[in-house]
């Protein structure tokens, strides 16, 4: 694995402050929506000025995009680890299982992120996650500095292709149709259950994925 230069003191200070702002925002989102979060209260909690806040996030909504990118980075890292042990459908099921655990831990935050992704017609780049931020936020994840924080769709698509190649899905499976099903399940199940019964998300993910796999097999016959 390639080595990376140690972040400078300035880079580490910048990363620490931006992650502190993100953490404060995530605490707020567990109890209330983003609309009710004021920049002033956030800055008071982190002990910076409002003018300084905008050096880290051009607008308040960028906090959700940044939290989304942190989550996507972690999910991609988890997916890469799963691919070292499994291929195909097992990787997809692992990603959905991991997501259900994260939603149970932080239902408010994850609900805001998923709702944001569902509303966005295309992925918004937002603030880049620096090397220093990766090391501070995920110090226990080996190799996180080199992990991609790209959209989850690429990993899902690759896993579907692997499932076809190893015979888990028929050769004539329409990957585009399968992707629509996966994305619908990924975002739809939490949106339907996060407030009423978040503990049921994992079981519902399993059920809906099995229905999708069965449907793809029948359709391809």
Image (cartoon, helix red, strand yellow):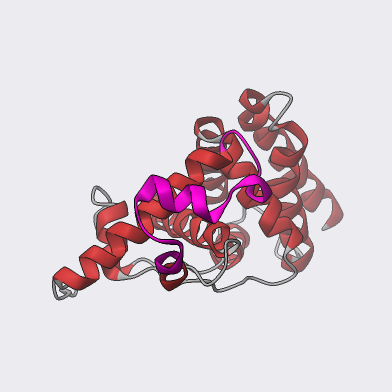
Q: Quadrant of the C terminus?
A: bottom right
Q: Position of residue 194 (x, y in %)?
A: 68, 33
Total numbered badges shown on the rendered structure:
0
Does the stretch in magenta take in 158? no
Residue 56 visible somewhere in the drawing: yes
Write down the region rendered in magenta.
Answer: 30-53
Q: Residue at x 15, y 69 (%)?
A: 9
Give percent across and percent down for residue 63. Answer: 53, 59
Task: Estimate the x, y position of residue 158 in percent, counting from the top left.
Answer: 55, 66
Observer-nearest of 96 and 178: 96
- For residue 76, above or below residue 55: above
- Residue under the point 71% across and 29% down: 195
Q: Is residue 83 toward the left or the right of residue 16 in the image?
A: right
77 left or right, relative to 10: right
Q: Position of residue 185 (x, y in %)?
A: 73, 46
Dominant secondary structure of the residues highlighted in magenta in the image = helix
Identify which residue is drawn at 53% across, 40% down: 28
Up the image or down, 54 lies above or below 93; here it is: below
């Amino acid at each position: 694995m390639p080595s990376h230069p140690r972040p400078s003191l300035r880079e580490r200070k910048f990363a620490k402050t931006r992650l502190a702002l993100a953490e404060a925002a995530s605490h707020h989102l567990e109890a209330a929506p983003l609309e009710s979060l004021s920049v002033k209260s956030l800055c008071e909690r982190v002990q910076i000025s409002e003018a300084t806040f905008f050096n880290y996030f051009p607008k308040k909504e960028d906090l959700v995009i940044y939290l989304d990118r942190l989550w996507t980075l972690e999910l991609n890292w988890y997916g890469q680890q799963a691919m070292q042990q499994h291929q195909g459908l097992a990787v997809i099921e692992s990603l959905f299982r991991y997501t259900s655990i994260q939603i149970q831990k932080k239902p408010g935050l994850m609900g805001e992120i998923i709702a944001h992704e569902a509303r966005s017609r295309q992925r918004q780049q937002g603030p880049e996650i620096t090397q220093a931020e990766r090391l501070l936020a995920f110090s226990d994840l080996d190799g996180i500095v080199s992990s991609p924080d790209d959209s989850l769709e690429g990993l899902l698509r690759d896993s579907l292709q692997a499932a076809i190649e190893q015979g888990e899905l028929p050769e004539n499976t329409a990957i585009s149709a399968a992707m629509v099903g996966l994305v619908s399940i990924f975002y739809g199940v939490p949106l339907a259950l996060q407030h009423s019964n978040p503990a049921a998300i994992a079981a519902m993910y399993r059920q809906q994925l099995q229905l999708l796999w069965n449907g793809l097999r029948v359709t391809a016959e």
